[in-house]
Image (cartoon, rainbow, N blue to C red):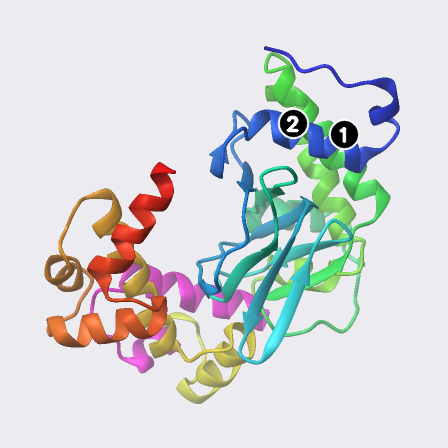
């Protein structure tokens, strides 16, 4: 079915984006699309803040509001602001404004640093501005970025054109971000010798070996940093230490294993590297607010509603 976009809505990119996201994300949850980097998210009610894994990318809210917490810092994003995630992050986050009549709607674009790097070859002198070291940043959404996002989502209605036109629109979106308020952070994602790229390398190392015992010296060597420098910059970017980051990853993976593979708490904890079931249950409850079995059952019941 092809949705009809009225001429009045087409004159307002945000209103058209709301209509497009509602059509292609008809139910709550994360929706993949035929354009590989593009995902759509919908939520019909506010939620409690819990740690969430954010992969590198751009998040544009078109309706509703969400909060993310990095330590004591609150990051709010809504239809006036977009979020840039420069490395994998695990903030506490939750939707704060949503209802069945007016759900939270958001667009997420995964970012490939190599694509950003290829664009930098044509813009070698772009955006040399001071950049915040943290891995989550917000900025006001310019009209040009909203317009490009709208044209990208329109291609979901014309899949025969998407293979040719989507890469062009994605490149424009990258360019709009690179030359905008967060351009310095975007550039750092692709510059090989930047601290951001080195921390990204360390994060990738931890993600590949999250279930194994970790020696900080090995992570530092992989990132070509000293152990003290790694610890300092890792905390600046992610608001946690490498060991805290590994623990959060372990608990998230265990939660997914219990939800998708039906593992019990002891089995999931062992799979992600915990030797003590009681320690796993204790840390899981501290992170997600309930014991593993009870919290996973709550998630299953919510998904059935």
Expressed as whole percent of the image width and height from the top left, the position of residue 180 reads 80, 55
57 and 106: which is toward the camera: 106
Which residues, given as a range, are shown in magenta? Answer: 193-221
Mark 1 residue crowding within 10 angstroms, few (<14) / some (14–19) / many (20+): many
For disc 2, the marked residue is 166
Looking at the rendered structure, which numbered label has been put on residue 154?
none
Tell me whether circle 2 and circle 1 mark residues in contact (CB < 8 Å): no
Position of residue 223 in the picture relative to residue 171 (left or right) = left
- Residue 241 forms part of the magenta stretch: no
In the displayed structure, would residue 159 be above or below residue 172?
A: above
In the displayed structure, would residue 68 be above or below residue 300?
A: below
- Residue 207 forms part of the magenta stretch: yes
For disc 1, the marked residue is 16
Mark before the other along the chain sequence, 2 or 1: 1
Mark 2 residue crowding within 10 angstroms, few (<14) / some (14–19) / many (20+): many
Residue at 41% across, 68% down: 202
Which quadrant: the C terminus?
Answer: top left
Residue at 35% across, 66% down: 288
Expressed as whole percent of the image width and height from the top left, the position of residue 152 reads 69, 29
Q: Circle 1 — which element?
A: helix
Expressed as whole percent of the image width and height from the top left, the position of residue 123 reads 78, 51
In the displayed structure, would residue 44 be above or below residue 290?
A: above
Distance from label 2 to label 1 (Cα)? 18 Å
273 and 198: which is toward the camera: 273
């Amino acid at each position: 079915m092809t949705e009809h976009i009225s001429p009045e809505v087409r004159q307002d990119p945000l209103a058209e984006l709301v209509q497009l996201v509602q059509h292609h994300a008809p139910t709550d949850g994360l929706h993949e699309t035929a354009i590989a980097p593009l995902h759509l998210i919908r939520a019909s009610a506010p939620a409690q803040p819990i740690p969430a894994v954010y992969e590198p990318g751009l998040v544009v809210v078109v309706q509703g509001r969400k909060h993310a917490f990095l330590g004591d810092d609150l990051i709010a994003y809504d239809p006036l602001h977009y979020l840039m995630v420069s490395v994998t992050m695990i903030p506490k986050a939750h939707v704060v404004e949503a209802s069945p009549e007016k759900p939270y709607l958001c667009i997420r674009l995964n970012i490939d640093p190599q694509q950003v790097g290829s664009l930098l070859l044509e813009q070698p002198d772009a955006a040399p501005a001071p950049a915040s070291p943290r891995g989550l940043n917000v900025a006001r959404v310019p009209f040009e970025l909203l317009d490009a996002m709208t044209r990208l989502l329109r291609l979901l209605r014309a899949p025969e054109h998407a293979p040719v036109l989507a890469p062009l629109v994605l490149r424009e979106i990258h360019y709009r971000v690179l030359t905008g308020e967060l351009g310095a952070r975007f550039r750092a994602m692709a510059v090989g010798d930047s601290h951001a790229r080195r921390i990204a390398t360390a994060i990738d190392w931890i993600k590949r070996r999250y279930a194994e015992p970790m020696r900080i010296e090995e992570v530092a060597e992989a990132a070509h940093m000293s152990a003290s420098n790694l610890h300092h910059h890792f905390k600046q970017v992610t608001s946690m230490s490498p060991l805290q980051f590994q623990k959060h990853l372990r608990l998230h993976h265990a939660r997914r294993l219990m939800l998708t593979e039906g593992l019990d708490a002891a089995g999931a904890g062992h799979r992600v590297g915990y030797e003590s079931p009681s320690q796993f249950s204790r840390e899981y409850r501290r992170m997600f607010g309930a014991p593993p079995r009870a919290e996973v059952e709550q998630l299953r019941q919510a998904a059935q509603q």
